[in-house]
Image (cartoon, rainbow, N blue to C red):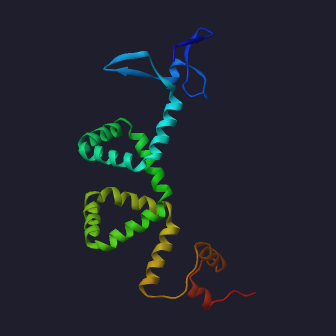
Amino acid sequence: MAIVYRDDIAGKICANPECGWKPLNEFGARRLGGFPVGDGYKSRCKDCFDAQKRAERAARAEKYRETARKYVVSNRDHIREIKCAHRKANPAKYDDALRKHHLSQRAELNVKARERREQSLEHYREIGRKSREKHADERNFYQREYGRRNRDKLTLFTNRRRARKYAAGGSHTEQEWQVLKAFDEYRCLCAASASPKIA
């Protein structure tokens, strides 16, 4: 189709009858050996051309998949280089995508991580020991600061560990524990039971 001007804007009439006239920037370039062919633009606009390609691909999906597989196998190193370069050029984009993936798949990823750890428990423990030795000062400082800011939580964790160690029965929440302490005026329960409050 020839180039058609409307309101001093160069355009073409798309080969798709339902589409009509569009500016030239809506058409892809048509080249052969680096030189323009015809008016230099494809007969269909970009949207119609893409829709036509999608329809062709859907009609012969397996053929296109096989072609793509062959290309990936024969150009594996080249594709890896392109992906690495794109990742280095857009680190924030990849970090954001990874964060969103982890948030949406958190439960499944946690299950898989626990399974991997159980299968190679000693291996992961060794990794933990080495990490602890390497960052001992930083971790000790963090733990001291955390304990200072969260003394009640630390006490709760310690008591829970002691209860598990002695296989003690029963349990209570943090809120129930605070109510119990307030009820006995923050005294030892042994002392409170020895001298009960007079109603």
Q: Is residue 58 left or right of residue 76?
A: right
Front in this rendered view, residue 56 or 183: 56
Say which residue appears at 61% left-offset and 23% top-offset: 20
> Residue 79 appears at what percent x and percent y?
29, 41
Work out whether 102 lies above or below 161: above
> Residue 45 appears at what percent x and percent y?
52, 26
Work out whether 8 lies above or below 104: above
Front in this rendered view, residue 180 or 78: 78
> Residue 95 appears at what percent x and percent y?
41, 45
Work out whether 181 lies above or below 137: below
Say which residue appears at 43% left-offset and 15% top-offset: 38
Residue found at the very far top of the displayed protein: 8
Q: Is residue 189 left or right of residue 73?
A: right
Work out whether 107 lies above or below 81: below
Q: Quadrant of residue 36?
A: top left
Front in this rendered view, residue 1 or 88: 1
> Residue 177 appears at what percent x and percent y?
59, 76
